[in-house]
Image (spheres, rainbow, N blue to C red):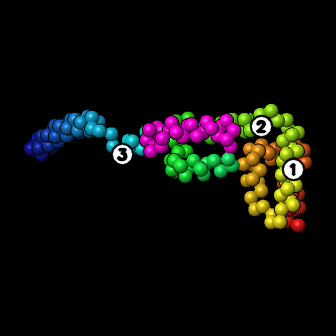
Amino acid sequence: MKNIKSILTLTLIGGSIILTGCSGNTEASAEKANNQPTTQAQTTSNNSASNYNVDMTSLEKDLKALEEGKYNGKWEDELEAKYGDDWDDAMEAKYGENWDDEFEAKMNAKLNEGTTKEDLIKSIEGDLSEMLNRVEAPVNWEDELEAKYGDDFDDLMEQKHGDNWDDLFESELMK
């Protein structure tokens, strides 16, 4: 019985020494691994604009031109064609997730600069009337208006004509 206790004690002590040695080696390996060049996994988790293959200077110049009034309803498609799929991700990495909302607000403000709310409503109504007179009804009439007037066109029309103005327009459009 004494021999069994002695063997168990020696095994326990020996196992502890071996485990301690292993954990020491693991720490050295981990320290060595931390000094290695950055891996792809670490690079992708680091969300900075430099991780995208996008010419940020040129992209920002194009966005500035859009902001100053050279507006096109398909500006996002044009930027994607010019800079690839990652341009939006690069902008989010540099300026935050809501950069595009702020950008569109600036574009809309510039677009509507010096124009009263009544002028905008009259212009929207004129475009709606023109759409009703087309030979073929426009498929994406809301997109056309948004491209021209920004996201707020719907709110302006609701203020004047009520919440269901768009349903009434669509029913007229389909006649």
The magenta segment is 47-71
Residue at (90% x, 48% y) in the render:
161
Asked if residue 119 is positioned above or below residue 162 in the image, the reply reads above
Q: Residue furthest top?
A: 114
Quarter containing the C terminus: bottom right
Quarter containing the N terminus: top left
Residue denoted by label 2: 112
One can see residue 23 in this view: no
Residue at (53% x, 45% y) in the render:
87
Residue denoted by label 1: 126
Marks 1 and 2, Cα distance to the nearest angstrom? 16 Å
Residue denoted by label 3: 40
Comparing labels 3 and 1, the label whose residue is closer to the camera = 1
Q: Amino acid at mark 3?
A: Gln
Q: Is residue 50 magenta?
A: yes
Q: Is residue 53 magenta?
A: yes
